[in-house]
Image (cartoon, helix red, strand yellow):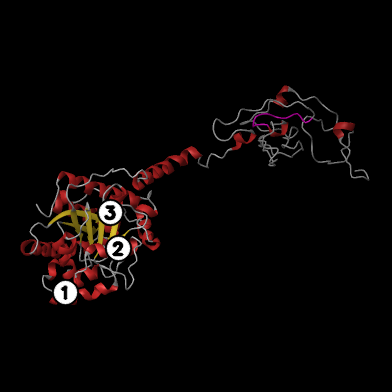
Amino acid sequence: MHDDGRYDDPRVTGAADDPVSRETEYPGWRSAGAPQSPSESDREAPTSGVPWSSARDASDPGGRPVNATPEARVIPIRRNTSASARFEPATASQQAPGVVPDPRSTADPPVASAAPYGPTGTDAAYVSHETPTREEDDPPLAMEAMRAVQILNPSGEVSMPRPERTRVMCVANQKGGVGKTTTTVNLAVALALHGNRVLVVDLDPQGNASTGLNVPHHTGVPDVYECLINSVPLEEVTQAVEGIPNLWCVPATIDLAGAEIELVSVVARESRLARAIDAYPGHFDYVFIDCPPSLGLLTVNALVAAQEVLIPIQCEYYALEGLNQLINNINLVRQHLNPRLAVSTILLTMYDRRTRLADAVEQDVRNHFGDKVLQAVIPRNVRVSEAPSYGQSVMTYDPGSRGATSYFEAAQEIAERGVKEPVSRNA
């Protein structure tokens, strides 16, 4: 080494003693230090199955000698990752496997062809085979986007058939937590997005349906309580749902909790809601009534006002246990108050495909109710549970999710059944 920091290179001076390293042997050079022209066998090094000799060590991409083990292979790796170097032609230090560079040659040997997929340029040969390509990720995303467009229906065209007469559907089940409100909100939004005029009557004092549709229902807001107790016309308490055309909601406040007691002394207490709906001046294709989890006077009002009963059933044993009692009450209302009432639709909710219990409940329900059970089944989906916290239905919160797709299929099936078998209060 000189005083200015330079090293003597034996490849230039031809000196026998190597001042740089006395242990490292350069490929193509005799141990005595005399230069030697590499043979053809040196240039075409084997890539597999043949070990390197200790006198012919591999060179790294920078051209510096490396002590290779007897089983080492020449696998050059490009180390220059600067932006300007990514698009430069491959040099001798950037050869593909199988090409041995000559340390004294200025000409670059042919570069191996790049991989038949992935990005172009010199980095193409080093694309990881474990990382999925964009073509493999696109199909699921594309399918989800197609489902979202189908559900949101931005064109506004009527893609679900409209019934000839208004269908008043009561969503009832005295078992709590089976998805009555969630079913009411999402079916209503799905039908409204596809050209149907829909009214949602929130008859639950908790007001969850009003929350799911982002309709104000705090104390002092005109609600369904005014219609039942004070005979206020229904159109005066109806609110349009923001962002969803053709969808209206009659909210429920905490005042409705006292309606059970106040209705006891009211004349024709069981038919107060039916009269309010019949007197509505506008026309709706669907009227969904969200019932409380009980069989009190509020639920009886909903059963008297409705023509059809939609029963959401959770795929668990407790949901089946109280189903007989609900059917008995529906039969009593049909016999004494509303002879046109019928159980038209059964919807299985919170289906967990990982459990055998869900399959057993589904089979029992289908064997007992037959064609009344919808083919669409609502799975357990976290998006369905998250949507109300944002004041939305899952149809608008995440239209590409499994929950939104399932409710869309259920709404489409209900619409098609209504066209085949129209139901009317005046029939």
Judging from the image, what secondary structure is the residue with disc 1 in?
Answer: helix
The type of residue carrying mark 3 is Leu
Judging from the image, what secondary structure is the residue with disc 3 in?
Answer: helix
Instruction: Give the x, y percent position of residue 305.
Output: 15, 61
The CA distance from mark 3 to mark 2 is 12 Å
**The label number, if any, that marks residue 187 in the structure image:** 3
Q: Which residues are magenta?
A: 95-103
Residue at label 2?
A: 209
Decide which of tag 3 and tag 2 comes sooner along the chain: 3
Q: Residues within 10 Å of mark 2 (few under 14, many from 20)?
A: many
The CA distance from mark 2 to mark 1 is 22 Å
Decide which of tag 2 and tag 1 comes sooner along the chain: 2
* Vertical order, 211 against 198 (above or below): below
Residue at label 1?
A: 263
Residue ranking furthest to the left? 335
Residue ranking furthest to the right? 3
Q: Nearer the viewer, residue 375 or 304?
A: 304
Asked if residue 121 shows in the view, the reply is: yes
Is-magenta flag for residue 265?
no
The type of residue carrying mark 2 is Ala
Instruction: Give the x, y percent position of residue 64.
Output: 77, 38
Q: From the viewer's perspective, is 362 left or right of 91? A: left
* Vertical order, 65 against 368 (above or below): above
Decide which of tag 1 and tag 3 comes sooner along the chain: 3
Q: Tell me which corner region of the image, top left, top right, bottom left or bottom right, holds residue 21.
A: top right
Q: Residue at x 23, y 44 (%)?
A: 161
> Contact, CB < 8 Å: mark 2 with mark 1?
no
